[in-house]
Structure formats: structure tokens, C-alpha cells
């Protein structure tokens, strides 16, 4: 009984660490799928539709009241009602994640097959668009939290050829 009492906390921490590791892996897959979905949506020329207008409740899809927030620099030219935005496409794939912790970066456009580095507004007739998002994952176990120094930041990037 004493041996069991001594080893039980170790087994519980190991089990919780495996559960947290699985949650991190699942979150990374969901984030990657969402960003890939957003890039495939952007490739049809929708690279300027970043997110919905945060001040207009009519733009929100009732089935997804919480979406990915607008990236810095978003303005009226980048707003589109759900589901016609990149943020919505990412949020649709993030079913098991806290969508408020997902940050969409401003999409980048370019003319060559390398990773685009310019804002889409500055490139006329872009050939490629890159969509990037990050997710701040909060572990359940203090062990994983201490191992990574707090929250874990997951990042996903996808580039698609613009088809126009």
C-alpha cells in the first residue's frame, strides 16, 4: 500500500502529461487544417477578406458566435460576413480549441513561388498568398506548463497559388 501511494502521483502526472501532449498535437492539426482551408479559400482571390466586422453583429454566423479575431491592420476593406472570410475558415476547423486564443496574421502576397513577403494591398495581381495563424495553448498540467515556460505557442502557415 505504501509503495502504491508513493508511485501513484508519478503515474498520474505521467498520464496527465500524455493527455496534454495529445491535446497539443490535436490543436496543431486543427490549426494547420484551418490555415490550409483559409489558404485554399484565398486562392480564389479572397485574400482581402480577412475577418468579419467586429462592430456589426449581422456579419456573424449564428452557428459560430466566436471566431478568430481580426489581425492588426484590418479595416473596412478587409471585412466580410461569415463564412466569406479567412478567419471564419480557420475557426470552422478549430472545433476543440479556444477560438479566442487564435491570432490570424495579415495575409501576405507575392509574385514568385517563394514565400510571399508583401501585403496583399501592395501587390497587383498576386500569384501566391500565404496565410499564418498562431494559437496560445494552455496546458492542463503544471508539469508541461513548467517544461515549456507557460503557454505553448503553436503556429501554422500555408501558401496557395492564386487562381484568377
Image (spheres, rainbow, N blue to C red):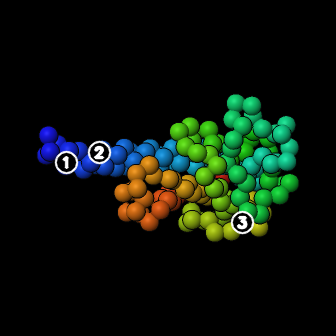
Question: Tag 1, which secondary structure?
Answer: helix
Picture residue at 86% right of the left edge, 54% below the top:
76
Q: Is residue 24 left or right of residue 120?
A: left
Picture residue at 31% right of the left edge, 49% below the top:
13
- Residue 54 appears in view: yes
Which quarter of the image is occupied by the N terminus?
top left
Mark 1 or 2 closer to N-term? 1
Question: Tag 3, which secondary structure?
Answer: strand
Q: Where is mark 2, residue-wise?
A: 12
Distance from the alpha carbon under mark 1 to that under mark 2: 9 Å
Label annotation for residue 119: 3
User: Residue 116's spot in the image, x, y percent?
Assistant: 62, 65
Q: Is residue 53 left or right of residue 83?
A: right
- The front one of 11 and 136 is 11
Q: Where is mark 1, residue-wise?
A: 7
Crowdedness near tag 3: few (<14), some (14–19) or many (≥20) residues, C-alpha within 10 Å: some
Picture residue at 83% right of the left edge, 40% below the top:
57
Q: Are marks 1 and 3 in contact (CB under 8 Å)?
A: no
User: Residue 133's spot in the image, x, y percent?
Assistant: 59, 56
Crowdedness near tag 1: few (<14), some (14–19) or many (≥20) residues, C-alpha within 10 Å: few
In the figure, 124 relative to 10: above or below?
A: below
- The front one of 82 and 14 is 14
In the figure, 78 relative to 115: above or below?
A: above
Q: Nearer the viewer, mark 1 or mark 3?
A: 1
User: Residue 102's spot in the image, x, y percent?
Assistant: 61, 52
Question: Tag 2, which secondary structure?
Answer: helix
Amino acid at each position: 500500500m505504501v509503495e502504491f501511494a508513493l508511485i501513484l502521483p508519478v503515474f498520474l502526472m505521467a498520464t496527465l502529461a500524455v493527455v496534454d501532449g495529445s491535446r497539443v498535437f490535436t490543436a496543431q492539426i486543427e490549426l494547420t487544417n484551418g490555415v490550409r482551408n483559409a489558404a485554399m479559400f484565398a486562392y480564389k482571390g479572397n485574400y482581402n477578406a480577412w475577418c468579419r466586422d467586429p462592430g456589426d453583429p449581422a456579419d456573424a454566423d449564428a452557428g459560430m458566435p466566436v471566431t478568430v479575431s481580426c489581425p492588426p491592420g484590418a479595416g473596412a476593406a478587409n471585412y466580410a460576413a461569415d463564412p466569406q472570410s479567412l478567419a471564419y475558415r480557420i475557426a470552422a476547423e478549430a472545433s476543440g480549441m479556444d477560438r479566442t486564443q487564435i491570432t490570424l496574421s495579415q495575409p501576405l502576397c507575392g509574385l514568385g513561388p517563394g514565400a510571399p513577403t508583401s501585403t496583399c494591398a501592395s501587390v497587383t495581381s498576386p500569384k501566391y498568398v500565404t496565410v499564418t495563424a498562431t494559437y496560445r495553448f494552455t496546458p492542463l498540467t503544471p508539469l508541461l506548463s513548467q517544461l515549456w515556460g507557460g503557454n505553448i505557442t503553436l503556429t501554422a502557415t500555408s501558401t496557395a497559388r492564386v487562381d484568377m
